[in-house]
């Protein structure tokens, strides 16, 4: 029987396997190092680009800083001017407000209606007066409600007053609020006083004969 020694063959095969495994590990390390190097290079490139953009933006900011300072100074000056204009407008409203209120009351005051007392407290205004009849008081109420200078016009009440020359007068009490803002159409209210006054005169003319007839009946 012939004996064959297989140990050298096995040893050679084991060494070949070890050599192949080593080559695979080395190849994997080389590929990993190459990948890491590529990623690192890409990141470094992006960091460099970002830093370059930052430097460029900082240079642009320094270049336009005088213009930015001018804009900031302009805005500050604009805010100061707007505040001064607002103060001037408030003073102007405070100066001309009572004059406009009295002018508006005169505009909408019908004939044969007059005020006996007028008082104000802040924007609130209270007025008492007398008229020939309730219809004329209603005309005054309607005119004040249509005026852009008055708000919340409210008739507190009416009552018969003292007789004058045989005519029965109607006392009234009206409360309203002076509009704090700028009227929407002040020109319409101030430019057409004849329209409201004409209505008041027309209605007053129609209502006047009734007290006169009553007075004539009383004399007879």
Image (spheres, rainbow, N blue to C red):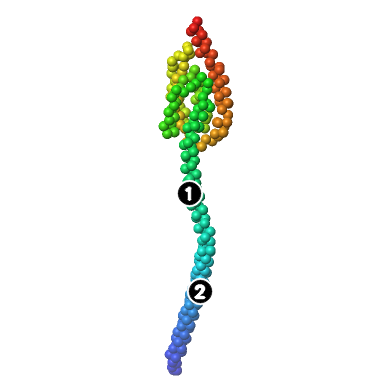
Q: Is residue 204 above or below residue 74?
A: above
The x, y position of residue 81, in whole percent, is 50, 48
117 relative to 197 in the view: left or right: left
Task: Kindly identify which residue carries mark 1.
Answer: 80
Do we see residue 17 in this rendering? no
* Residue 91, image x, y percentages: 47, 39
Question: What residue appears at the point 48 percent right and 36 percent down from the top-left corner?
Answer: 95
Tag in front: 1 or 2: 1
Q: Residue at x 45, y 20 (%)?
A: 171
Mark 1: few/some/many CA within 10 Å (<14, 14-19, 20+): few
Q: Nearer the viewer, residue 96 or 159?
A: 96
User: Residue visible at 44% across and 26% down?
Assistant: 118
Q: Is residue 67 left or right of residue 120?
A: right
| Gap in angstroms between the C-alphas marked 1 and 2 | 55 Å
Per the image, the residue denoted by label 2 is 41
Are there few (<14), some (14-19), or many (20+) residues within 10 Å of tag 2?
A: few
Quadrant for residue 206, please give it. top right
Q: Position of residue 170 (x, y in %)?
A: 46, 18
Residue reaching furthest to the left: 121
Q: Position of residue 52 (x, y in %)?
A: 52, 69
Secondary structure beneath dot 1 equals: helix
Q: Is residue 1 above or below residue 23?
A: below
Q: Nearer the viewer, residue 68 or 165?
A: 165
């Amino acid at each position: 029987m012939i004996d064959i020694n297989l140990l050298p063959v096995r040893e050679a095969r084991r060494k070949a396997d070890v050599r192949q495994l080593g080559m695979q590990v080395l190849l994997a390390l080389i590929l990993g190092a190459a990948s890491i190097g590529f990623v690192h290079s890409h990141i470094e490139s992006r960091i460099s680009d970002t830093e370059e953009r930052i430097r460029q933006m900082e240079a642009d900011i320094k270049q336009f800083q005088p213009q930015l300072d001018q804009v900031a100074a302009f805005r500050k000056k604009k805010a100061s001017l707007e505040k001064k204009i607002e103060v001037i407008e408030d003073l102007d409203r405070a100066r001309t407000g009572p004059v406009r209120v009295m002018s508006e009351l005169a505009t909408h005051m019908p004939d044969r209606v007059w005020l006996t007392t007028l008082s104000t407290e802040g924007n609130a205004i209270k007025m008492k007066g007398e008229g020939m009849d309730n219809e004329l008081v209603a005309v005054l109420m309607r005119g004040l409600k249509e005026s852009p200078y008055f708000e919340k016009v409210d008739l507190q009440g009416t009552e018969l007053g003292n007789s004058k020359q045989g005519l029965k007068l109607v006392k009234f009490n009206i409360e309203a609020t002076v509009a704090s803002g700028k009227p929407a159409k002040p020109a319409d209210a101030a430019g057409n006083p004849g329209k409201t006054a004409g209505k008041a005169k027309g209605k007053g003319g129609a209502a006047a004969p009734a007290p006169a007839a009553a007075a004539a009946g009383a004399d007879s």
